[in-house]
Amino acid sequence: MRASTRRPDLQDFEDFARAVDRADGVEAFGEASFRDVSEDRPARYLALYDPQLIGLAIMGREGTELAVHPERRGEGFGRMLAEQAVQIARPLRLWAHGNLEQAQGLAASLGLEPMRELVQMRSGEDIPDLAEETARIEELGVRLATYPAAECEDPQELVALNARAFAEHPEQGAMTAADIAARGGTITLARSGERLVGFLWIQEEPPELYVLGVDPDFQGRGLGSRLTRLAQAQLGVPATLFVEGDNGPALSAYERAGFVRIRTDIQYEAPAD
């Protein structure tokens, strides 16, 4: 067996990730890690080979994710990766997607504590009518346009609104213009007069309400709920979304829109000294 701190080959990584997904029923590596590998973004790696990739830890901007190939579990490789990651990534923020029992045990053995909860939700089969939902938003004095539009060719306006809407969000609030271009999907802008007051971002494969942001000064007027319904209408099929577990108002709003909780991801951290 050999260890490497180099970025793994993309095909090797994708094959490894698929094997883990099939075995666990939940992905070990999220979008951020895939972008780290495919786009060579700043990140640190610890990969184990024997001779193929059998274990991998990715320590990126959004946290650390690690996994061991299903055929090589029970040999101590997961703990080996985690112990090294604790030394490399300071502070360690270890994601446990689905918060599986094995991940809970590993976190407890390392003295890590749950610090963040991310809830995945899924909408029902009742798909709203697109024309009706568009009209309901326009009743608020808001007009819609698909980004990029002539009145918003500069992504910095969208970046600035996103930063205001997600000022407390450790990842989404740091979105840049480059992130907008890299992530794909369809973005709908919501304007009141000349002011950008909200936006809706959907991904079609798989169907996901990816981001929904409303200017804090415009909150409390029902725009968020109506944009949620608009997203369901745009996608035309049941879709998923992620929301912070401590965001009670958002959880309640999504539940009222017909979304139900289907999974919880936990980010574990070492307690403060």
Image (tube, helix red, strand yellow):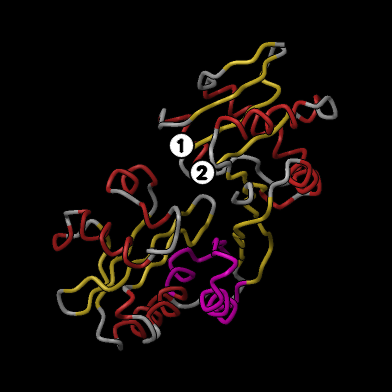
Residue 196 % position (x, y): 23, 70
Residue wearing tag 1: 35
At a point 32% along the width and 66% down the height, the residue shown is 164
Q: Quadrant of residue 159?
A: bottom left
Residue 9 % position (x, y): 53, 20
Q: Residue furthest toward the front? A: 273
Three-letter code for the amino acid on which mark 1 is drawn: Arg
Q: Please give the count of numbered marks on the rendered protein.
A: 2
Residue 74 % position (x, y): 85, 29
Q: Is residue 128 left or right of residue 190?
A: right
Q: Classify mark 2: helix, strand or loop.
A: helix
- Quick check: 48 above or below 270? above
Q: Classify mark 1: helix, strand or loop.
A: helix
Segment tinted magenta in the rendering: 230-259
Q: Rounded to the nearest whole Å, what is the CA distance between mark 1 and mark 2?
A: 6 Å
* In the image, residue 163 lies in the stretch drawn in magenta: no
- Quick check: 9 above or below 209? above
Q: Residues within 10 Å of mark 1 (few under 14, many from 20)?
A: some
- Quick check: 175 above or below 231? above
Residue 135 % position (x, y): 33, 83
Residue 31 - label: 2
Q: Residues within 10 Å of mark 2 (few under 14, many from 20)?
A: few
Q: Is residue 38 left or right of residue 261?
A: left
- Quick check: 273 above or below 4? below
Q: Quadrant of residue 148?
A: bottom left
- Badge 1 vs badge 2, beta-carbon distance below 8 Å: yes
* In the image, residue 237 lies in the stretch drawn in magenta: yes
Nearer the observer, 65 or 16: 65
At a point 22% along the width and 54% down the height, the residue shown is 155
Nearer the observer, 202 or 161: 161
At a point 67% along the width and 19% down the height, the residue shown is 48
